[in-house]
Every structure is written in C-alpha cells, then in structure tokens.
Image: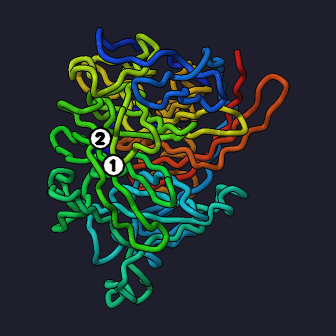
Amino acid sequence: MRLQRASWVACLTWGAVACDGDSSTGGGDGGAVTSSSTSSTGAGGAGGGGAGASGGAGGEAAAEYTATLTDVTFRCKLLSGAFLEDPTANDVQTRFNLKGSDLGIPIVLGEDLHFFFGDTVGYKVIWDFGEDPDSVARVPFASVLRDPSAICDDLDFYVTSDVPSVANGVDPTIERDFAGAFMTPPDGQLVEQYIAQPAGPFANMPGTFEVPSGGLEQDGKAYLFYAGLVQLAPTRATISYLARWDVPGATQPSYQIVRALDALSGGALGGHFIQIAPVELDGSIHLLGTGDYRHSGVYLARVDAADLEVGAEQAIFDPAIASYRDAASITQEQREAIGPIFEVDGVGELSVSYVADAGLLIALYQRELRDGSGNIIDNRVLLRVSASPEGPWSEAVTIIDMADPAFSSSHCCGATCPGNQILHCDRAGLYGAYVVPAVTFAADEDGGTLDVPFVVSTWDPYNVVLFSTRVRVVAR
C-alpha cells in the first residue's frame, strides 16, 4: 500500500535507541475465555487445547526481554537507482517492464524466498500509475541465507506469457512483462465483495491500495492475508481476507479467495485485523493485526493451523484478562472493546518473525503519530521482541527515527537519489517494514545479538530498499 502524498514536516532520520512504552487494556465482561495466560516456551506455545476456547495461551509467564539498538546499515535499492527509470543490479526495467512498487512481504515457498509486492507500476506501455496491480518476485532462499544482499541483484519476477514484452516494439531492450496477481472469488460470491479498486479494467486483479499484508506457507501452498475493499476518502482498506496460491513457483500469481477475515464495521475479529502478520507456532497460527490504517495499536488472535481455511474457533487475546476469548462466543461490542497487546495508535503495516536460535519473536512496524490537526509529530520504524505472542513484549526499540538529522544527511534525496539517498524527505516517509527471514543470532553469556535484515518502502521515488539492523537482547 502506498502512502498518501502529503507534506512532511521533517525529513526522515536515524534514531538512537528509544523505548516507546505502552500499556493497553480492553475487553469486556462475559463470553468464553481460555484458561491460562502466557507461554513459558521459547516459541510461545499455543497451549495444549488449541486456539479455541478450550486451549490456554501456554504455561507460566514467559521471560521478559530488554532490547537495545546496536546499529543499522543500508544495503541497497531493489528496483530503481537515482530515479525510477534508472536500473539497479536487478535491472527490473528491461527484464520485467517494471519501474516501481512497494511492500515486498517475504515468504519462503519451496527453495525460493518470494516477495509479494503491492501496487506495481510498469516501465513502458503497461500498467501506469493509478492502475497498480500486485506483483511477485523470488530469489533462491539458500542465497539469501548466505547473504541477504542476494535480493539486491537476483530478484526474478513472475512474468506473463508474452514473448517478447508487449513493449518490445517501443523499446527492444524490454524482454518480458511482470505478471499481476489475479483473484478468483469463493463459489457463489462476487469478486466485488473483496476488491473495490481493481487494476485498470480487470475486476479480478487487486489495484490501488488493495494489497497483501502478510502470508505463510502450508503444505506447499501460499496463504496470503489481503487488505481489501479499499475506500479512497479516507484512503484505507475496510476488510481483510485470506487467499490461497495452490502452486507457487509453477504458475503465475493466481489466487483463490478462501474466506473473509475481518472488517472495520461488524468484523468477526472486532475490526482489529485488517493488516495481518501471521506466524505459526506449535500448531497454531498467531495473527498480529491492526485495524483502522495508522490509527490502531497491535492486536493478537490465533486459529488452529488445521482450521485456517474455515476459521473455526478463532480466538482474540484479551490483555485485560491475559486470556484468549473465543471470537464467536462474545458480542460484537465485546470484540471491538478488546485492547491491543502493544501500541495504542499509529500502526499500519507490520511483520512478525520467529527466530528459533534465540527462542524469540520479532515484531517490526512503522508507527506514525499525528496531532489534533493531522500533522505528523512522530514517525519511526520500531522493533520489539518477546518469547511468546502473548508477551510480555519488550519496550519498542527505534530502528529508524524519521526526525533525526543523521538520517537526513545520509539518505534524503536532492533533485535525484544517487548512491545511499533513498527518498525525498520533504514529501515521503518510510513504511511497510518487513523482516527478511534470514535473521541470525549470536548468543553470549548475558543474552545475544540479533542481526535482522528487513525491507522497507520509500514512496517517492516509488521503491523498496534493504536495510539490516543489529539488536542486543537480554532476558530480565
């Protein structure tokens, strides 16, 4: 999802370590609840009873961690260099007839790491700004594990069957055309129940702001969590839904919509799960979610992995009582009243990743806070860690502070964006921060250091870039 064009008060900048505290409560009386609180296992176990009303959140309280920023390193631009038509080592302009995109949600599927991009713009002839189909690229996962910078020069986008590109007559250097994602609705339903802004005239292709928010692999299939039914005033997705790609790697990105998940109005999960970052632990799929775009904290729900497609016994974690509540057994008012697990405002896109070597979950997200007049007063990329989805989560560590002059001097563009300059800071900001699943952990006697590669979007120029950050974690 691309940011709305807006006047930014200050340039984006590096930040030193900053802990952004939060304490959120919510919930309500009545309704089915689970029997216990948080997990003591490194993976944040889902409890013996599963995700529904009979399963607890785990055993004894999980250990609490502190996290401290060590450093942040810029790695590369993925799609364009000094300007949109300027190629990087991935050479997407002539290889795939593509010049801009955002997001890039990473999912390991088979031997490849896939990146699910949002609104994508063609280089010549195809897909102008405002049409915005979604696109998908891949790179050998083994290469990324050896060096995450492999995505800087080895991205391979899925392409249409046209050989050569439909733009080859205009520019003979253009080889192929990237393929846009295509949705098939459930039997008996219309695609318009899920997509309000299609790509150009193609009703089944998600268009402007209709984008993936997270995903995972199950049994060789890709399950994608989509934000949909986008309204443009204000610009926000109003529902979320689950889509399935049955044969990733062997077909173009053609997805079957499985089911609706949540909605801002009358949603089955209280309107808290429009942007969704999933993680599978101990047979349950935990969902970290946000509701109204950039006006939300971060919420937690779970469902048994075996029930992902049907959504049976979905449960929302209520931090006020430290237990899960069966979503179908409580009222809509009670679902909506459940509070976030961290943050209370300003969060849109987010990602979560489990690091087995550390026994820790990493949550990475952008938070944008505004004053009563709508002016941005704080904008940063934040990271938290926890041994359990239910928490306790560490205080937020600022990875990138968008008001620190050190970042501005290194990464804000002039007329163009050469070298390490990545965005026009007077009118754009970073968003869509996603952990690349190639995190390493170096343990020591007191804790250890996480080395976390991540992608993040720049908006202007319309690009995705790769950073890495090192964060020291210590159990209290």
Q: Residue at x 47, y 25 (%)?
A: 55
Q: Residue 340 placed where, x, y %?
A: 39, 21
Q: Nearer the viewer, residue 100 or 148?
A: 148
Q: Amino acid at mark 1?
A: Leu
Evaluate if marks 2 and 1 touch, with contact meaning CB atoms under 8 Å apart: yes
Image location of residue 107, percent across then percent down:
52, 54
At numbered mark 2, what does the secondary structure look like: helix, strand or loop?
A: strand
Disc 2 residue crowd, few under 14, some 14–19, many 20+, Cα 10 Å? many
**Vertically, is 122 above or below 376?**
below
Residue 173 in view, yes or no: yes
Instruction: Report which residue position mark 1 lands on.
Output: 242
Give the secondary structure at mark 1: strand
Disc 2 marks a residue whose amino acid type is Leu
Q: Can you see residue 408? A: no
Residue 179, percent from left and from top: 36, 72
Residue at far right of view: 445
Depth order, front residue of 356/423: 356
Quarter that holds the C terminus: top right
What residue is shown at x 44% (from left), y 24% (from top)? 54
Horizontal side, residue 324 vs residue 406: left or right: left
Binning the other alpha carbons within 10 Å of mark 1 as few (below 14), some (14 to 19) or many (20 upward) gives many
